[in-house]
């Protein structure tokens, strides 16, 4: 893959990470955090050393989607660094573990907080850091991509035509930054009821994205009550049901990042 455009010096906390994967969406609520968390636990299940950085400062989902015993990040006072919390062997950093209320911040402050959380964390040796990006393609996202040398991006969307326009924006942002988009995940594609399959948001925009932008992989995720229940329970679906259909999809995604 092309070398990412990376403007700063590599922060020491990131020097021990082999691959940094951005999971991105252009709107909130499409399942970006669900994909980020399940991808991370799939990679861990394949034997990789994995961390998740929840960069969604306005609406951090990680504290709901995983249930570590220690729900507060600890500081190393000597090094003035942050020690991630951990759940089932995956290292976790989220603003939601910083012990503060919901943020009311302007863009530059948000970028500062993200920058600090990400670069002063003692991640240690990791094969993959999965970043749950803030939704959208604005300044916060751009700044983040400039602080961090991303290896690859995964874009999450829903199947509507409208979402296609958003995905195009995301693909353009990453291609400007020379970060390869390796996959699009079309979430909430279909559901099965009474022996029939329904496509509530229509079909076809995913394959249009793949054709138009030359993205190598497209994955479908169904609407599944277990996906939402596992998100709420703090146990990712791929951990709760490692042999299920969803886990299989994430293994295929895991191979292509
Ligand atoms: P985002 O990070 O894009 O805001 P989330 O991953 O937080 O989205 O998902 C929003 C909500 O939808 C969560 O409650 C999540 O559990 C639920 N959800 C996401 N994908 C699915 C799915 N395929 N089936 C059922 N519920 C889902």
Image (tube, rainbow, N blue to C red):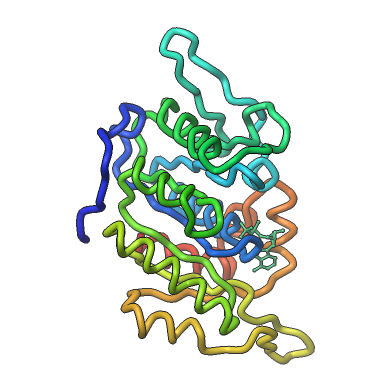
Rendered view: 235 above or below 77:
below
Rendered view: 191 above or below 256:
below
Q: Quadrant of residue 99?
A: top right
- The residue at 34%/45% (across/down) is 146
- The residue at 33%/50% (across/down) is 150
- The residue at 40%/31% (across/down) is 119
Q: Quadrant of residue 86?
A: top right
Where in the figure is residue 131, as x and y percent of width and height?
Answer: 47, 48
Image quadrant holding the N terminus, namely bottom left
Q: Quadrant of residue 11?
A: top left
Rendered view: 74 above or below 47:
above
Q: How many labels were placed on the picture?
A: 0
**Residue nearest the observer in this picture, 99 or 87:** 99
Residue that sits furthest to the top in the current view: 78
Residue that sits furthest to the left in the current view: 2
- The residue at 50%/70% (across/down) is 185
Where in the figure is residue 220, as x and y percent of width and height?
Answer: 53, 76
Where in the figure is residue 64, as x and y percent of width and height?
Answer: 70, 45
**Residue nearest the observer in this picture, 195 or 149:** 149
């Amino acid at each position: 893959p092309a070398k990412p455009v990376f403007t700063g010096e590599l922060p020491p906390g990131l020097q021990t990470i082999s691959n940094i994967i951005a999971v991105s969406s252009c709107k909130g609520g499409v399942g970006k955090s669900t994909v980020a968390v399940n991808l991370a636990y799939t990679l861990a299940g394949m034997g990789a050393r994995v961390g998740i950085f929840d960069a969604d400062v306005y609406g951090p989902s990680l504290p709901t989607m995983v249930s570590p015993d220690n729900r507060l990040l600890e500081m190393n006072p000597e090094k003035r660094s942050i020690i991630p919390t951990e759940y089932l062997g995956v290292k976790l950093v989220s603003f939601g573990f910083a012990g503060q209320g919901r943020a009311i911040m302007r863009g530059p402050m948000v970028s500062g907080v993200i920058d600090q959380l990400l670069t002063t964390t003692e991640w240690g040796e990791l094969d993959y850091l999965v970043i749950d990006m803030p939704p959208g393609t604005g300044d916060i996202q751009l700044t983040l991509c400039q602080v961090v040398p991303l290896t690859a991006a995964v874009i999450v969307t829903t199947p509507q035509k409208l979402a296609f326009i958003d995905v195009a924006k995301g693909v353009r942002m990453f291609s400007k930054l020379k970060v390869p988009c390796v996959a699009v995940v079309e979430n909430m594609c279909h559901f099965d009821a009474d022996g029939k399959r329904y496509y509530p948001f229509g079909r076809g925009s995913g394959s249009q994205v793949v054709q138009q932008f030359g993205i190598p992989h497209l994955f479908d995720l169904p609407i599944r009550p277990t996906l939402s229940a596992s998100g709420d329970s703090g146990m990712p679906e791929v951990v709760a049901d490692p042999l299920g259909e969803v886990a299989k999809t994430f293994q295929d995604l895991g191979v292509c990042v």
